[in-house]
Structure formats: structure tokens, C-alpha cells
Amino acid sequence: MRPDQPVAVPGIVRRLAGDAAVVAVWRNELGGLTFHVGADRYVKWTPVGDLAGEADRLRWASRFTTVPRVLGHGTDGDGSWLVTAALPGRSAVDPYWIARPDAAARAIGLALRVLHDALPVAECPYDWGVAMRLGRAGVTGFADPPPVDRLVVCQGDPCAPNTLLHDDGTPAGHVDLGSLGVADRWADLAVAAMSTEWNHGPGHSGAVYAGYGVAPDAERIAYYRALWHAT
């Protein structure tokens, strides 16, 4: 969510920024922060885990589609950071798109379709499948997944804030690719549509599927939303 109170800027972010302005633009539930630094950079910082995996995924995905260019990453005793170049476009939760919820939802679906069509499954070294996710989260006894509809390279965290859009609704790129990997496309679609309910209000899920070009699949939607909450 966008911080609504002043945010303490980690020392490494201050050092990376130099004389440039630093503005906190996002805080996640684990205490991670994203800062807009100057006019053309973002610094993502987290006190938990290591962002090297996300840097690797961004470098791989950049060969095929539009994602932020990695400028640097590292760790210290306080956390891990990732510096990327800014992309054009607005987040799908920018006030411009909040005022146009159905158009935003349709554009999110289109952006996912473009991403899925661009990234080659056969060349992807990253996994986002059910077994991996359950194992990583230590979840046992979860239901078996429906048969795979279509394997794609999933964004992995397809919530609306991570889609960037041009003002005409065409995709500008994706951010936060730390979970990118191969899985059924419904692992992305079900959650992307669900996130429009959180960010744009009820009633816009269908526009996500329409923008993607697929009919809603109730079984897979229910399964992958449950998996998201469980893991």
C-alpha cells in the first residue's frame, strides 16, 4: 500500500540516492519499502530475504518483454536492496486508473496476456508451480490442482499495482517479478482479477478476463485464489 505516514528511509537508500530526492511510494506487509529516487530510478528495500533472485528474474525477462532495467542490488546487515530504472506509464492503481476501474481491469488483463505470450516457457529456469509454492510455504494437505490449462511464465505477483499502463490502456510493463516462474496461467489470472476487487472495487473481475481474451474458469479461479491465500 502507499504509505500514508512519514517513512524512515534506510541508510543504504539514502546513500544510493546521493543528492536526489527520495519519496516512499509503497510498503508491503513484510516491512519492505519502495522508493522513487530522483526522476529515473526506484530502490526496493526489504528487511527480510534477498532481492538477488528478483534481479536475476528481471534480467532474464528483459530479453523478451518490458521490465525495469537492473542498475544494482546488494545486501547489508539491515536488509537487501534492488535499484532499477524507471519505466514510462502509470501503475494500474494510479488515481488516473482508479477513476477508470473497468478500463483499468481490462488493461490489466491485456497486459498479462502480452506478458504470457512474450515469455518462453521452454527457456525459463524459474518455477512457480503448485508443488513448489506449497513446499516453500510448508503447507501440507492442500487439494490437488485442476489439470493445467496452459503453462506460461507467470508474473507471480500479478496484483494490480504491479502492472504499468500507458494512458491509452496499452501495457507499459510489469514490476515486482520476484516470484516469476512457470505455472498455469490461472495462477496469475485468478489473482489479478481478485486484486481489482481490492483496488478498484467490486464488479470488474470480468473485465480482466475479457482483456486477456479468455472466459472465466470458475474451478481454476477458486483453486488459485485459495492457493494464493494459503501460501
Image: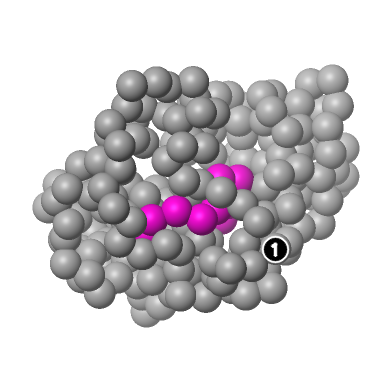
Give x and y (percent) for residue 8: 67, 24
Residue at 17% in and 57% down? 217
Residue 119 falls in which quadrant of the image? bottom right
Q: Is residue 27 left or right of residue 202?
A: right
> Which amino acid, mark 1?
Trp
> Which residue is located at x 61 percent, y 30 percent?
32
Front residue of this view, candidates 132 and 187: 132
- Give residue 156's position: percent from left, percent from top: 48, 49
Drawn side of residue 224 relative to residue 164, left or right: left
Magenta includes 31?
no
Residue 39, position as x, y percentages in the image: 70, 60
- Against 140, is 223 above or below? below
* Helix, strand or loop under label 1: helix
- 137 in relation to 148, above or below: above
Q: Which residues are magenta?
A: 175-185
Q: Mark 1 highlights which residue? A: 60
Q: Main secondary structure of the magenta part?
A: loop
Number of numbered labels in the structure image: 1
Q: Quadrant of the N terminus?
A: top left
- Of residue 35 and residue 186, the one placed in the foreground of this image is 186
- Identify the residue at image location x=67%, y=42%: 44
Could one spot residue 92 in this view of the protein? no
In the image, 86: left or right of 72? left
In the rendered view of the protein, which quadrant contains the C terminus?
top left
Image coords of residue 77 (percent x, y): 84, 20
Comparing 99 with 117, the one in front is 117
